[in-house]
Image (cartoon, rainbow, N blue to C red):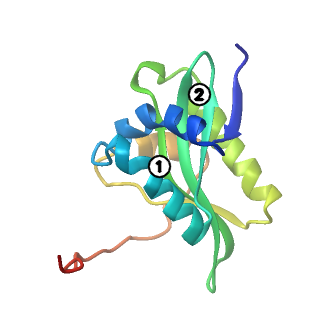
Amino acid sequence: MTMRIAVADTEPLLEACYPVMAELRPQISRPEFLPLVGRLAAINNFKIAFLEDDGIKAVAGYRVSEWLAGGRYLEIEDFVTASAARSKGYGGALFDWLVAAAARAGCRQVRLVSNLRRVDAHRFYLRKGMNQEAHYFSINVAGPSA
């Protein structure tokens, strides 16, 4: 099979992406995955791109949005290469595809937020030319009542 990168736009393709996505998001069970992706797609046009080369090797969840301060951007919300496929160029190829998709969508930037503990991922992002330009803050709030 030849390497291809595409958007998972059917349930079978999304299901095929789940095992790799679960390496990054193990808290999301297989039964929760499709409904969650569908809801995010409806709310903010969330998409999952995948790189396939004799199986799914890397996946990325992303969306295009716009901020007053920075204009239109592509936000990478999830980015993972299968553990057995790392350091083989798959992540780099998928990242480059996302940057090209951002350009086609008229975006000014590609952005992502990464957990502080993901040091290897940070080195990858810096090698790909990304800049660390902000601090990200959060606070937990009570969820909906049961």
Type of the residue with mark 1: Leu
- Find numbered disc 1 in the image and state the secondary structure of the residue it sits on: helix
Residue 37's spot in the image, x, y percent?
50, 55
Viewer-nearest residue: 61 or 36: 36
3D distance between C-alphas at marks 1 and 2: 24 Å
Quadrant where the C terminus sits is: bottom left
Quadrant where the N terminus sits is: top right
Viewer-nearest residue: 50 or 33: 33
Type of the residue with mark 2: Tyr
Residue 3's spot in the image, x, y percent?
70, 22
Q: Name the residue under label 1.
A: 34
In the image, residue 1 above or below residue 79: above
For residue 69, side relative to residue 2 (left or right)? left
- The total number of labels drawn is 2
- Find numbered disc 2 in the image and state the secondary structure of the residue it sits on: helix
Q: Which residue is drawn at 74% across and 66% down?
A: 107
Dot 2: within a 10 Å radius of its alpha carbon, few (fewer than 14), some, or many (20 or more) residues?
many
Residue 101's spot in the image, x, y percent?
75, 51
For residue 114, side relative to residue 73 (left or right)? left
Q: Which residue is drawn at 44% across and 60% down?
A: 113
Q: Mark 2 points at which residue?
A: 90
In the image, residue 123 above or below residue 71: above
Q: Along the polypeptide, which appears first: circle 1 or circle 2?
A: 1
The part of the image, by quadrant, that contains residue 41 is: bottom right
Q: Which residue is drawn at 42% across and 19% down?
A: 84
